[in-house]
Amino acid sequence: MHVHGRPPPAVDAFTTPAERLHMPIRRARAVLALSAVAVAAATIAVAFNGTASAASTLGASAAERGRYFGTAIAAGRLSNSQYSTIAAREFNMITAENEMKWDATEPQQGRFSYSQGDQIVNFALSRGLKVRGHALAWHAQQPDWARNMSGQALRNAMLNHVTQVATYYRGKIHSWDVVNEAFADGGSGARRDSNLQRTGNDWIEAAFRAARAADPNAKLCYNDYNTDNWNDAKTQAVYRMVQDFKSRGVPIDCVGLQSHFTGGSNYPSNYRTTLSSFAALGVDVQITELDITNANATAYANTVRDCYAVPRCNGITVWGVRDSDSWRSNESPLLFDGSGNKKAAYNSVLSALNEGTPTNPSSPGQSSSQPGNGGGCTATVVPGTVWGDRYNTTVNVSGSTNWIVTVTLTSPQRVSTTWSGTFSWDSSGVVMTVRPNGSGNSFGFTTMMNGNSGARPSVSCRTA
Ligand code: G3I
């Protein structure tokens, strides 16, 4: 049963002014002394306001600024402790490099296989990291049975795939690459020819509608490469599609720029224009597969600065952990070398991340501060009292009074008590949706650990 209303006094860490009036004098002095410390701390905070803080990992720095910094992960490498240690330490968003693609998740028609994707999702969520889903509909990495299909049968199979996979992972995915790489390279600005495209030009919007119906809380992205240079015909073509979708109410929330900066596709000087132009259409922008030939440190830092200059550029993902993990390992394009050492590019990225002004600074006693979805509001987790079998969490929402926050627990943890919000759960019992109840922009809940004492909830925010 979920008990609504304020928790018992023992749960609250702070006294009210009325309670202080009735305190014994010694305790009142102690409170006054603590208040003085609090004022001093606030003064220091004001003094430092606007000064860049220096978080020591990529994910922590990004989270303090309401963004994320992620990596692609291969399930088969998770047993390598150097790999998984770096991944968990440095990043707060994880993308499955191959394990959620069509050939992996539906190897035979109607027979779904989630074990490898689950390995990655469990790795992430049990450590409080978020997950980008990649990719529901794509011309490549289709299972043989789908590659041999066409027409209405293929359209139906694709929509069923989108529905099944997005439903299976509902509540666990921050953002989905719903459609990947649907535009042609070169100067035509046309759609890429593929079996999916030949089912009709509306296949992309049909996929987005199916994804929204299956997982209403995930951000839905269109993802592509060679869309970094604002002057390229392909960039313009994707821009026009997103503009059209927004004008017709097709459910799209974000655009992913893969940003594989290779010798043939270098970091463009107008990248910031590209990011801000997409954002101006009313979508989030995410850099989804960043890697740069020989890990040019200047290009990496400029990429971060360009993202941070655009408020709706809410996250950056690099396409792998160490150079040896990269799909183009011969170009050494990542932030860690094959031995797991930080490269010069790592230092330049961390410095550039730390240049941004913190919006969610961590403070003592607040072990985690998490970004919202960037959808017009930010939800910040403030860890509360921990008992042997349960713990409290407060969530503060900023940026909107008309918010919807999704809280995702790790099973078998369950919420037992809630306060200061309107709460509902999905059928899994681990995804809680919270709306304002008129008491303000903060709510709380008690979670029973049920044997899992390590996991903590993740939150995301969007406006209603
Ligand atoms: O797992 C098999 C292994 O059993 C087999 O022995 C080996 C030899 O062929 O192949 C292995 O599978 C490979 C898989 O990566 C895992 O390493 C596939 O052949 C290979 O094609 C696949 O490449 C992936 C590529 O997408 C496929 O299109 C890359 O890892 C992956 O990084 C890459 O990611 C894409 C994004 O999804 C979309 N944007 C471009 C990006 C880079 O191509």
Image (cartoon, rainbow, N blue to C red):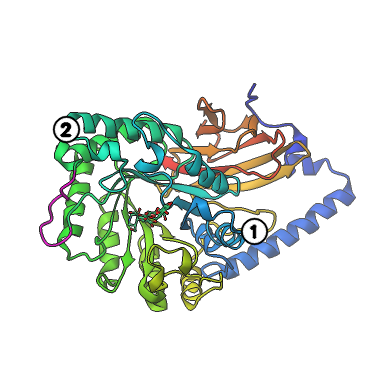
Foreground pick, 354 / 225: 225
Foreground pick, 17 / 316: 316
Percent across and percent down for residue 398 are: 49, 48
Q: Secondary structure at mark 2?
A: helix
Residue type indicated by callout 1 = Ser
Image quadrant holding the C terminus, namely: top left
Q: Give the CA distance from mark 1 to mark 2.
A: 56 Å
| Residue beneath disc 2 | 151
Judge whether residue 86 is colored magenta.
no
Residue under the point 78% across and 36% down: 10
Marking on residue 363: 1
Q: Quadrant of residue 394?
A: top right
Residue under the point 35% across and 31% down: 163
Question: Considering only vertical position in the picture, is 64 above or below 284?
Answer: below
Percent across and percent down for residue 15 are: 75, 43
Instruction: Report if residue 356 is visible in the image.
Output: no
Foreground pick, 247 / 430: 430
Horizontally, residue 270 falls left or right of residue 81, namely left
Which sits earlier in the primary sequence, circle 1 or circle 2?
A: 2
Percent across and percent down for residue 261 are: 32, 68
Percent across and percent down for residue 368 are: 61, 53
**Label 2, residues with CA under 10 Å away: few <14, some 14-19, many ≥20:** few
Which residue lies most toward the left here?
188
Question: Considering only vertical position in the picture, is 429 above or below 35?
Answer: above
Q: Quadrant of residue 110?
A: top left
Residue under the point 59% across and 70% down: 47
Instruction: Report if residue 2 is visible in the image.
Output: yes
